[in-house]
C-alpha cells in the first residue's frame, strides 16, 4: 500500500505492478498479530521518534515474519530493536 501511495500516474503504477511481479513479490495481509505489534510500536515510538502508522505496519509485518524489509528510509526503522532491513537508493 505504501509503495502504491507514492506513484504519480497510471504509467508508474503499471511499471510498479510489473516490477513487483518480476521480483515475485508476495503481498502479506495485515492480521491481528501484525496489528497488535503495530499498535505496540506506535505506543513505544510515536512520541519519541515520530513513527508513522504506515511504517509501524511495515515494521510489525517484517518482525512478525522475521523478514528483512527493503527501504530507502532507514531512519524510519533503525531505532526498532530486532528489525532487519536493507537500504536502497533510487538512482
Image: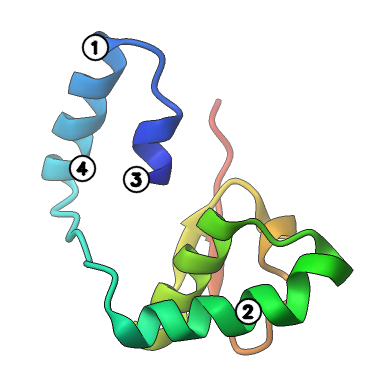
Q: Which x, y percent locates residue 72?
A: 59, 46
Q: Residue at x 34, y 45 (%)?
A: 1
Q: Which x, y percent locates residue 60?
A: 47, 77
Instruction: Name the mark nearer the viewer: 2 or 4.
Output: 2
Mark 4 secondary-structure assignment: helix
10 Å neighbourhood of mark 2: few (<14), some, or many (≥20)? Answer: many
Q: Which mark is residue 10?
A: 1
Residue placed most toward the observer, 69 or 60: 60
Q: Residue at x 75, y 67 (%)?
A: 46
The answer to whether residue 48 is left or right of residue 51 is right
| N-term-proximal mark, 2 vs 4 | 4
Residue placed most toward the observer, 85 or 55: 55
- Residue carrying label 4: 20
Q: Which mark is residue 41?
A: 2
- Residue carrying label 3: 1
The answer to whether residue 24 is left or right of residue 63 is left
Q: Are marks 1 and 3 in contact (CB under 8 Å)?
A: no
Q: CA distance from mark 1 to mark 4?
A: 15 Å
Q: Which x, y percent locates residue 28?
A: 22, 67
Q: Quadrant of the rendered structure where residue 67 is?
A: bottom left
Q: Are marks 2 and 4 in contact (CB under 8 Å)?
A: no
Work out whether residue 66 can be spotted.
no
| N-term-proximal mark, 1 vs 3 | 3
The image shows residue 63, relative to residue 87, as above or below, that is: below
Q: Are marks 4 and 3 in contact (CB under 8 Å)?
A: no
Work out whether residue 70 can be spotted.
yes
Q: CA distance from mark 2 to mark 4?
A: 27 Å
Q: Which x, y percent locates residue 21?
A: 12, 43
Mark 2 secondary-structure assignment: helix
Amino acid at each position: 500500500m505504501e509503495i502504491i501511495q507514492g506513484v504519480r500516474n497510471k504509467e508508474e503504477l503499471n511499471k510498479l505492478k510489473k516490477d513487483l511481479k518480476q521480483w515475485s513479490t508476495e503481498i502479506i495481509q495485515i492480521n491481528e498479530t501484525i496489528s497488535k505489534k503495530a499498535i505496540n510500536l506506535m505506543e513505544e515510538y510515536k512520541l519519541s521518534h515520530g513513527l508513522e502508522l504506515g511504517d509501524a505496519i511495515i515494521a510489525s509485518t517484517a518482525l512478525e515474519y522475521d523478514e528483512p524489509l527493503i527501504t530507502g528510509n532507514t531512519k524510519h526503522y533503525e531505532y526498532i530493536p530486532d528489525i532487519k532491513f536493507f537500504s536502497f537508493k533510487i538512482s
